[in-house]
Image (cartoon, coloured by chain):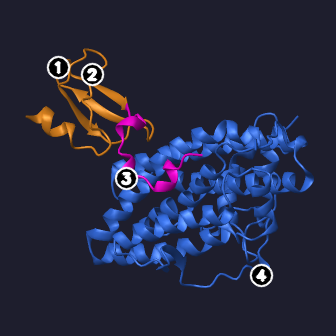
Chain colours: A blue, B orange
Amino acid sequence: MTQQTFASAKNLPADCRDAVHALLLAMSDTKMFLGFHYGEWTFGTPALEAGIAACCMSQDEFGHLRLLHACLTSQFGDSASTLIEKRALNEFANIACLDRPLAKWADFVAINLFSDGALTVILTGLQKSAFEPVANFVDKMVEEEKHHIRNAQGWFRTLATYNSQTKAALEEASRWALSPTLEWLGPANHAMMQTLEQYGIVNASWETLRQRFLDWVGAFAHDQKIFIGLEQKNGHWTPTFPIDFSKWNPNLRRCALTQPDEKILYHLRGSKNAIFKLGEHN
Amino acid sequence: MQKEKNKKQFAGITDEVRCPFCDSAETQREANFGTTLGYAQFYCFHCRTPFEWIKWDEHAPESDLPSFLSIKI
C-alpha cells in the first residue's frame, strides 16, 4: 500500500499536526543548545583541532536550526525571532543535560555522543517522511551528522583508553548525559509517538528508533569498557536505572519542571547587544 | 616515503589525494578539519600550496558509523 504523503501542515490531521509541531520544536531547541555548547567550546579544548571541530559542529547545528525554524515558520505559523526571543525559560524542549554550561571536556564528549546521537537517530527516522517539508531537508542533516558521530566516537575512544582519570571522567559524564537524553526520547508507547508512526511521519516505530539508539551506544560503550548504565538483555541494550515517565510532558519532552539556565538564553538571544538588532526598533 | 606514509594516516581518507592546482600526488594531510568538519587540510609538496579536500562519504569507512545510519528505508 502506498503511504499517503502531506505536502503541507494544513493537510495533516489535527492530532498529527500537533505531534509534528511539538517534535520539530523539541528538535530545533535541542539543536540550538547543542550549537551554543559546541560554539562555546571553540576555545578551551584539549587540542586545537578539537576546537575547530567544535566550531564546525556549532555551524552545522545553527544551520539545521535555521532549516527547522524555516519549516516551523512556513508550516506552523511560528516566527524564528519569537521562538528564540519571546519564550519563557520553561517553554524550551531541549534535552535537559544541555540546560547548563558544560563543566569539563568529558561532558562535551558525552553530549556529542548521546544527545547529538539521539537526535540523529530521530533524524534518520524522519527520512522519507510522509510530511514532505521535513523529508526535503532531513537527508542533508543526516549526512552532516555523520561527521558529528565520527568526532564523538573518536573522542569517546580516546578518553576511554587514555588513562584512569579520563576514563572515570568519561564514565561519570556518560551517565550524566544518558538519562536526560532517554527522557527526551520519551516513552515509546505515548499517543504522540504512535500518531507519528500511524501517519508515516517517522519510518519506524518509536520503540524501534529508541532501541536503535540504545543498541548503538550500549555496544559502543561496552566495547570501550565504559559502564554507562545499560545492560544487554535478549540481544538488546536496556537501561539499568528507572525512568519515571508518569509526569512526562510531550511538549517539553521532560519528566520534571526543569529549564535552561537564563545566562545561556541571554547569550543565545544576544541580549547584551539588543540595541543593535536591526529592524526591531521601528 | 613521506607521501605514502601520510596517505594512510587519516582514517576515512584511503584514496590518493591529488593537488587541485597542479594535480600532483605529492601531498600530505596537515589537519583533519578545515573551515568545516567536512574538509581536511592538505599541503602539496610539488607546487607548495596548501589546499582543502572534501571528505566525500564514499571515501569514509561506513564500518565506523553506527548501523542505524545504513538502514535502507
* Residue at mark 4: A246
Q: Mark 4, mark 2: which one is toward the viewer?
A: 4
The residue lying at 79 percent from left, 67 percent from top is: A250
Q: Tags 4 and 3 in contact by the CB under 8 Å rule?
A: no
Screen quadrant of the C terminus of chain A: top right
The residue sitting at 48% across, 64% down in the picture is A216
Query: In this picture, which residue range is highlighted in magenta?
Result: B54-73
Residue B16 among magenta residues:
no
Q: Give the label on residue B46, or none.
A: 1
Place residue A22 in its image quadrant: bottom right
Helix, strand or loop under label 2: loop
Q: Secondary structure at mark 1?
A: loop
Residue A64 shown left or right of residue A249 in the figure: left
Residue kind at label 4, given as amino acid type: Ser
The residue nearer to you, when weighing A138 against A49, is A138
Where residue A95 appears, as percent x and y from the top left, is 64, 65
Amino acid under disc 2: Cys
SS at circle 3: helix
Residue A34 position, x and y percent, is 58, 56
Q: Nearer the viewer, mark 1 or mark 3?
A: 3
Residue A60 or residue A127, whichever sits in front: A127
Instruction: Report whether mark 4 lies on the same chain as mark 2.
Output: no
Residue A69 in view, yes or no = yes
The amino acid beneath tag 3 is: Asp
Residue located beneath label 2 in the image? B19
Asked if the residue under mark 3 is in contact with the one under mark 1, i.e. CB atoms within 8 Å, the reply is no
Residue A142 versus residue A173 in the image, above or below: above
